[in-house]
Amino acid sequence: MMTPIRFKRLKASFAVLPAALFVAGCIETPGEIAISEPDPDLVFARGYRSPSDECQLVGESAFTVDFLDDAADLVACPTGSSAMETLIAETGEQIITQTNSFSFFSLAHH
């Protein structure tokens, strides 16, 4: 049989639980950890979809050499930009790597 003191402690624990869960739900979990290094030297050739496109066709550099492919374009968009969002929506491609400021995509030639 449960003693009155033990029952009160158990009851108090259940009373605190919803408040603790509510506070835990308000705490934002960190997203991907931002890269603290400065952006590497990048060689931008031109806007990818148009001359004024924020997403740029990227040429060879020490950073990009491992991501270049003869059958695809390497494209860099400012991370979080609307240009990046539309590129993802249009192509369905995933980010292959990131720097401090840019997200990179490998887009197959059509």
Image (spheres, rainbow, N blue to C red):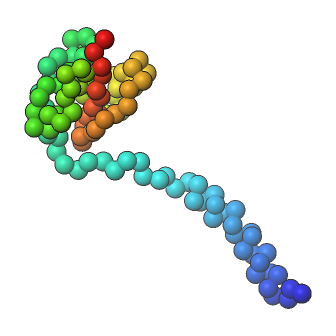
Horizontal relation, residue 96 to residue 45: left or right: right
The residue under the point 52% across, 56% down is 27
The residue under the point 10% across, 33% down is 61
Residue 78: x, y in percent? Answer: 28, 30
The residue under the point 72% across, 74% down is 13
105 relative to 91, above or below: below
19 relative to 59, above or below: below
Horizontal relation, residue 85 to residue 74: left or right: right
40 relative to 22, above or below: above
Where residue 7 sits, quadrant-wise, is: bottom right
Find the residue positioned furthest to the right. Answer: 1
Residue 91: x, y in percent? Answer: 39, 20
79 relative to 17, above or below: above
- Tell me if I can see residue 55 in this picture: no
Residue 99: x, y in percent? Answer: 24, 40
- Tell me if I can see residue 102 in this picture: yes
From the viewer's side, name the closer residue of 29 and 106.
Answer: 106
The residue under the point 74% across, 69% down is 15
Residue 17: x, y in percent? Answer: 69, 67
